[in-house]
């Protein structure tokens, strides 16, 4: 008799058919106990406990549900690489698939936190090898006691969560959009209004980074600098280099040093640099062209850098490339100088955009308009396109759901980390600029920590001045 197995977990068209009873029995036995004892909490555990306490204080008496999310199906039984939701990671330090953090109101105030996650695969019912995503296929998971020790947080079997949520009597807030099953299960219990508040609070909690996060962002920037160096070494000085090779070169470094890239790398050579989200990366970087490389390593704790350098592929800027580059550099200097505690968040953007407008005016691109007039009318945006930066952290565009008054209309505080990334982009088909400018795109982007005194450029190890960029490239290629 074949063993009973769950049809839905079996691959259709598997080369193996039925499992004999003898094989099923055989697979249950003969496995060593691999439980790890004496584990210590990870360094992050002290920080996540503090963050959960802060969240708890914001929502007394409410049950809070923060899912990590499910792997997204790519096709059939294959999935995209899994990355847990940033809020789940922020509050637990855990990266388990499908996990859910529950903060249940406690009797004497505050909340009891429990992370619901998959335990070790069951050997008795064959799940560990007959389920295509059992541990035999996907790798060993931490046991619940192991995770409790590592995360400093009670952990429970995910399969008990539905009952627990069903039994909840008070108000529930759910971070929607990460786990369709939980969204549906709680549809009658959670209001959209509640969700919105929850998302905003979580985003705003992440505006000021703690020392663990700052250290991790620093590491992300250092690893990113190594990736940029690898790319420079890979660039041909007399032959073209494919944008795909550049993308792969950076990605290799990201996988070695960290978890992944924090966003799709923009490897934009020649006129591709004028397309802000150029991630097709199917062109070629030719000597004589500029390469705009916007890429960031995401660390194993999932914090990402976001850095751009615009490099002369052949090693030297042409005079027109240098002219545009130096305007962007001057704008970035003005932007970075405006990053300091107590400054309005907008200041760095306005400082950089003013400098860009002045250069564009000096080049005669506003015709009869002065730089001031053009700036007031926002005319520079035809060529500067994007805002000058954004918060950075677990997400490349971090804290995105914070209230406007806390973010773009807010004030800079020590511990905030933001990008300063002015650019000039002259489209190839822009008939309003002289031909020599067309197809040139330049962005310089750095990751800036607000300190007590002013700021620190976390990505400063990568040169920015035109001549320093040239010298650095020459040194790497020797
Ligand atoms: N790489 C995305 C950005 O710079 O915002
Ligand atoms: Mn970027
Ligand atoms: Mn950016």
Image (spheres, rainbow, N blue to C red):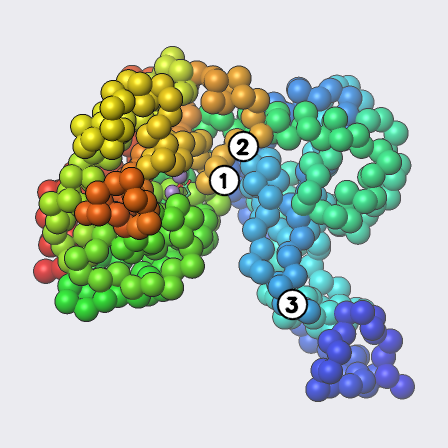
Q: Which mark is residue 75?
A: 3
Question: Could you tell me which secondary element the residue under label 3 belongs to?
Answer: strand
Position of the C terminus, as image quadrant, is bottom left
Task: Determine if residue 420 is in view.
Answer: no
Distance between the alpha carbons at the discs numbered 2 and 1: 9 Å
The residue nearer to you, when weighing 25 against 50, is 50
Disc 2 or 1, which lies upstream in sequence?
Answer: 1
The residue beneath circle 2 is 400
Disc 3 or 1, which lies upstream in sequence?
Answer: 3
Which mark is in front, 2 or 1? Answer: 2
Question: Could you tell me which secondary element the residue under label 2 belongs to?
Answer: loop
Residue 365 locus on image (x, y percent): 24, 32
User: Cβ–Cβ below 8 Å for labels 3 and 2?
Assistant: no
Q: Residue at x 73, y 76 (%)?
A: 11
User: Cβ–Cβ below 8 Å for labels 2 and 1?
Assistant: yes
Query: Based on the displayed image, in which of its 4 quarters is residue 93 positioned?
Result: top right
| Ligand 3 quadrant assignment | top left
The residue beneath circle 1 is 395
The answer to whether the beta carbon of the residue marked 2 is less than 8 Å from any atom of ligand 1 is no
Describe residue 234's horizontal placement relative to residue 183 as left or right: left
Number of other residues with Cα within 10 Å of mark 1, as a class: few under 14, some 14 to 19, many 20 or more: many
Residue 190 locus on image (x, y percent): 80, 32
Query: Based on the displayed image, in which of its 4 quarters is residue 354 positioned?
Result: top left
Disc 3 or 2, which lies upstream in sequence?
Answer: 3
Q: Residue at x 25, y 20 (%)?
A: 370
Number of other residues with Cα within 10 Å of mark 2, as a class: few under 14, some 14 to 19, many 20 or more: some
Residue 13 locus on image (x, y percent): 73, 82
Distance between the alpha carbons at the discs numbered 3 and 2: 30 Å
User: Cβ–Cβ below 8 Å for labels 3 and 1?
Assistant: no
Distance between the alpha carbons at the discs numbered 3 and 1: 26 Å
């Amino acid at each position: 008799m074949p063993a009973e197995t769950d049809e839905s977990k079996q691959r259709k068209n598997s080369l193996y058919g039925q499992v004999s009873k003898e094989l099923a029995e055989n697979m249950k036995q003969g496995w060593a106990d691999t439980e790890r004892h004496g584990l210590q909490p990870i360094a992050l555990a002290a920080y996540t406990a503090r963050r959960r306490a802060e969240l708890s204080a914001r929502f007394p008496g409410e049950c809070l549900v923060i899912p990590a999310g499910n792997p997204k199906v790519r096709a059939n039984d294959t999935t995209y690489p899994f990355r847990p939701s940033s809020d789940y990671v922020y509050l637990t330090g855990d990266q388990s698939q499908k996990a859910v953090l529950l903060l249940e109101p406690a009797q004497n105030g505050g909340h009891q936190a429990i992370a619901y996650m998959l335990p070790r695969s069951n050997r008795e019912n064959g799940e560990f090898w007959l389920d295509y995503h059992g541990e035999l296929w996907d790798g060993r998971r931490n046991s619940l006691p192991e995770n409790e020790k590592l995360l400093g947080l009670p952990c429970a079997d995910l399969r008990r969560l539905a009952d627990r949520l069903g039994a909840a009597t008070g108000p529930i807030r759910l971070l929607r959009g990460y786990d369709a099953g939980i969204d549906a299960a709680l549809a009658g219990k959670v209001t959209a209004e509640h969700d919105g508040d929850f998302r905003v609070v979580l985003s705003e909690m992440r505006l000021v980074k703690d020392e663990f996060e700052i250290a991790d962002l620093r590491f992300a920037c250092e690893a990113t600098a190594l990736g940029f160096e690898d790319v420079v070494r890979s660039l041909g000085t007399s032959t073209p280099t494919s944008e795909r090779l550049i993308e792969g070169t950076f990605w290799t470094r990201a996988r070695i040093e960290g978890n992944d890239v924090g966003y799709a790398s923009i490897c934009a050579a020649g006129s591709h640099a004028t397309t802000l989200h150029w991630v097709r990366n199917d062109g070629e970087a030719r000597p004589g062209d500029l390469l705009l490389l916007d890429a960031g390593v995401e660390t194993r704790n999932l914090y990402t850098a976001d850095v751009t350098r615009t490099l002369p592929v052949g090693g030297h800027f042409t005079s027109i490339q240098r002219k545009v580059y130096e305007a962007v550099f001057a704008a970035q200097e003005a932007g970075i100088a405006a990053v300091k505690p107590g400054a309005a968040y907008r200041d760095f953007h306005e400082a950089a955009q003013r400098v860009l407008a002045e250069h564009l005016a000096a080049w005669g691109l506003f015709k009869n308009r002065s730089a001031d007039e053009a700036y007031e009318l926002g005319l520079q945006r035809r060529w500067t396109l994007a805002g000058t930066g954004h918060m950075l952290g677990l997400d490349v565009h971090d804290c995105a759901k914070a209230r406007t008054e806390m973010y773009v209309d807010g004030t800079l505080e020590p511990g905030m980390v933001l990008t300063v990334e002015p650019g000039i982009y002259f489209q190839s088909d822009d008939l309003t600029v002289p031909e020599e400018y067309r197809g040139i795109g330049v962005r310089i982007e750095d990751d800036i920590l607000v300190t007590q005194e002013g700021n620190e450029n976390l990505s400063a190890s990568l040169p920015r001045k035109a001549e320093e960029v040239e010298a650095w490239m020459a040194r790497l290629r020797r």
